[in-house]
Amino acid sequence: MTSPEVAARALYWFFVYGILGWCVEVIYAAIREHRLVNRGFLCGPICPIYGFGMVGLLHCMGRLPHGDGAPGVLTVFLVGMVLTTAIELIGGWALFRLYHIRWWDYSHLKGNLGGYICPQFSLLWGLGSVIMIKVVHPLLARGSDALPFRVLLPLDCVLLVFFAVDLGASAAAAAGLNRRLREIDELRARLRISSDKLTQLLGTGAMTADTLLDEQKLQLALAKLESRENADALRTELTARAEALRAKLRDIDLDRLGTRRLLRAFPRMQSARYAETLAATRQALVHLRRLARNARAAAQEAADRLRRQE
């Protein structure tokens, strides 16, 4: 087999196992969370870390010395565990250096290294490597190895174009996540200043996030400002800043292929710069969705009453 053929086949298996890995992640998340979630850094149905892991593992297995033509189970387990753990560590560290965000976090598990890797998942990677090398890959290879180079090359090219476009769009979305968190952090800081002014003026406790995000509750709280000095200016300031924060959160909720998707795909995501803002944003989005559902339910109930009266 020539070098171009070897490269084309390696790229083919990268896409095959990247897509299979994405399927496994989605199924795993669906079982745990009872909903379908695109569990991956990329928008498309592929997790590159699985593709790199399997291509690297196949490469290692093809060059290990073994007497009967096939590596033993223990060898596959150990090599697979070390290789995939190394890829996970390097990938997690590289993404953190690029975006200052920890996309997955094993800090809650014993023996973890910086939250990037942990022995529990390393053992699972080793077990998965045995299953893939001994069971899955031989089955897939029976049909795929027969693909001629003239078919494999254009197929790889098409997939590579889609992958490159997806990678660019996903990288932009990840950069956009940091930008949105920075904007929300600035809005929260300004809103906190206005809220503190209101607290000092009325002599009450600090306003909760629920009150600030719920327009009706906010207006009820602001109604207490009547006849107070500088009431109009403070009311305008607080209303404008609360609405700006709500608008920014609504933008995130509508960004289904960008920030919203990343927040759903990585529920344990941690931000080095905006840790508090990231946690508050998740909670605020849940609250806004609940308010929207309640508003739709109230509108539907009102419409039903009108129809009954007619």
Image (tube, helix red, strand yellow):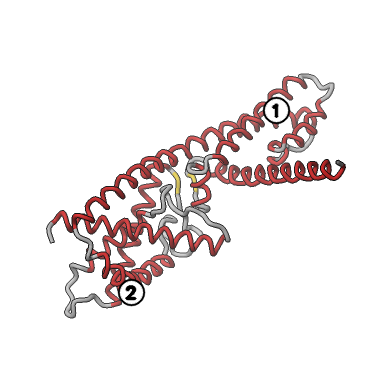
Please name the amino acid that badge 2 sits on: Val
Mark positioned earlier in the residue sequence (2 or 1): 2
Q: Position of residue 177 (x, y in %)?
A: 48, 40
157 relative to 270 in the view: left or right: left
Question: Picture quarter containing residue 218?
Answer: top right
Q: In which quadrant will I find the C terminus? A: top right
- Give above or below for 149 relative to 185: below
How crowded pointer 2 is (Cα within 10 Å; few <14, some 14-19, many 20+) is rated as: few
Q: Residue at x 83, y 24 (%)?
A: 226
Residue marked by disc 2: 135
Assess whether mark 1 and mark 2 are in contact (beta carbons under 8 angstroms). Answer: no
From mark 2 to mark 1, how far is it between C-alphas?
62 Å
How crowded pointer 1 is (Cα within 10 Å; few <14, some 14-19, many 20+) is rated as: some
Q: Position of residue 216 (x, y in %)?
A: 76, 35
184 relative to 139 in the view: left or right: right
Residue marked by disc 1: 239
- Give above or below for 187 relative to 16: above
